[in-house]
Image (cartoon, grey):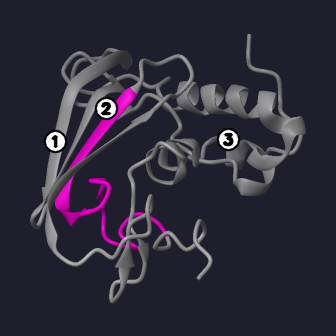
Amino acid sequence: MSPEPLRGCTADSLGRRSLGPVFRNDPRNWAKTSRARHSSAVALFRRRCKECGTSAELKVAPSIQGRAGTSEVEFTNFPYLACRCGHVARWAFDPGTDFSEQLFFAEDAVPTAAGSDAVPKCRRCRADLTTQQEVTLEATARIDDFAPIGMRVRLLGYRCPSCGLDQAPPGDFDAGGFSGWYW
């Protein structure tokens, strides 16, 4: 049985990673979005691997690590789909905007200093931040039907001398914290 067609979507849009901000932000479409997310993931893995002949199955990587310059990132409990030989591997979920919003923009996301690069301020207490040092920041994303996905980033950032909050430099993960501060 094929999934029921979704109003407001085309066949082309279901194959893309996101249904777009207008569709996703409309409360009337929230139930449709999760079905579309599932449908798009299913459509990607109907084909079989040319090497081993198997379809992709759900797997979880306990740790995925990467590095860019002096910064390091690690994801834990990361779900993916892969065939037996590992030749065909894809995300097990449609990250859309939910994934990045939870990691970088939500209230409990990776903290980013407020202000500007020239005058960074602590996001929590508004103290001036002067000296950069290596900091480790953590956040968790909760995607439906999967265990929480953890992210740990180690980078050159700031530790507030007043409250002790570790935070990324302004503009590294968001618009410098301006949305929360009005100077």
> Does 129 sit above or below residue 26?
below
Query: With 130 as the anchor, is 48 left or right in this view?
Result: right
Q: Using a 10 Å C-alpha cutoff, classify the residue at mark 1 as few (fewer than 14 neighbours), some (14 to 19) or many (20 or more).
A: few
Task: Inspect the image, locate mark 2, and give the three-letter code of the amino acid beneath it.
Answer: Ala
Query: With 119 as the anchor, is 47 left or right in this view?
Result: right
Query: With 70 as the anchor, is 128 left or right in this view?
Result: right
- Residue 81 place in picture, x, y as percent: 37, 24
> Does 170 sit above or below residue 35?
below
Q: Residue at x 69, y 28 (%)?
A: 34
The C terminus lies in which quarter of the figure? Answer: bottom right
Residue carrying label 2: 89
Which comes sooner in the sequence, label 3 or label 1? 3
- The magenta span reads 149-174
Measure the alpha-carbon separation of dots 3 and 1. Answer: 30 Å
Residue 65's disc is 1
Q: Using a 10 Å C-alpha cutoff, classify the residue at mark 3 as few (fewer than 14 neighbours), some (14 to 19) or many (20 or more).
A: many
- Residue 146 place in picture, x, y as percent: 46, 19
Task: Inspect the image, locate mark 1, and give the three-letter code of the amino acid beneath it.
Answer: Gln
Q: Using a 10 Å C-alpha cutoff, classify the residue at mark 2 as few (fewer than 14 neighbours), some (14 to 19) or many (20 or more).
A: some
> Hey, which residue is sitting farthest bottom in the picture?
118
